[in-house]
Image: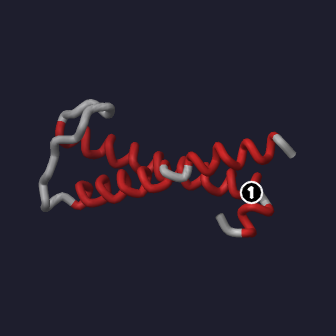
């Protein structure tokens, strides 16, 4: 973790959680669109693999981005611990 993030843990937590929320919202929007086309429930795994559909690429990109930001959640826990012990 860089010095700036360590120096301002509250701002870092907010930034990470904001990115996580934004990427989750995008992922959910893509799932709704793909689900409406493929008659899948929003919580179901999307079975659509139409390489001609631009939403397939958007959905896959959004899922990967969400997973990447989810990986930062451990850092949020660590920073929360630092903040609570200050």
Residue at the location (68% across, 68% down)?
2
Apparent side of residue 49 relative to residue 67 in the rendered image (left or right): left
Question: Residue placed at 32% from the left, 31% from the top?
Answer: 43
Whole-percent x and y of residue 48? 16, 46
Count the labels in the image: 1
Disc 1 crowd, CA 10 A, few/some/many (<14, 14-19, 20+)? few
Say above or below: 10 vs 45: below
Residue appearing at x 53%, y 50% in the figure: 20
Q: Quadrant of residue 47?
A: top left
Between 59 and 1, the one lying in front of the other is: 1
- Residue 26 lies left or right of residue 40; in this view the side is right
Secondary structure type for disc 1: helix
Nearer-the-camera pick, 85 or 62: 85
How did the renderer colour the structure? secondary structure
Which residue corresponds to the image point at 77% horizontal and 47% vertical from the top-left? 82
For label 1, the residue is: 11
The one of 79 and 61 positioned closer to us in this rendering: 79
The one of 11 and 62 positioned closer to us in this rendering: 11
The extreme right residue here reads 86
Q: Which quadrant is home to the N terminus? A: bottom right
Is 57 situated left or right of 14 in this image? left
Asked if 45 appears above or below 12 in the picture, the reply is above
User: Toward which corner of the image does residue 77 lie, by quadrant?
Assistant: top right
**Residue 73: horizontal and vertical position, in percent?**
56, 47
């Amino acid at each position: 973790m860089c010095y700036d993030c360590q120096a301002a843990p509250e701002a870092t937590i907010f930034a990470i959680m904001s990115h996580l929320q934004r990427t989750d919202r995008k992922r959910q929007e893509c799932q709704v669109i793909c689900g409406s086309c493929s008659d899948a429930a929003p919580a179901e795994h999307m079975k659509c693999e139409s390489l001609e559909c631009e939403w397939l690429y958007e959905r896959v990109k959004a899922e990967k981005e969400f997973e990447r930001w989810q990986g930062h959640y451990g850092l949020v826990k660590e920073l929360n611990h630092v903040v609570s012990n200050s």
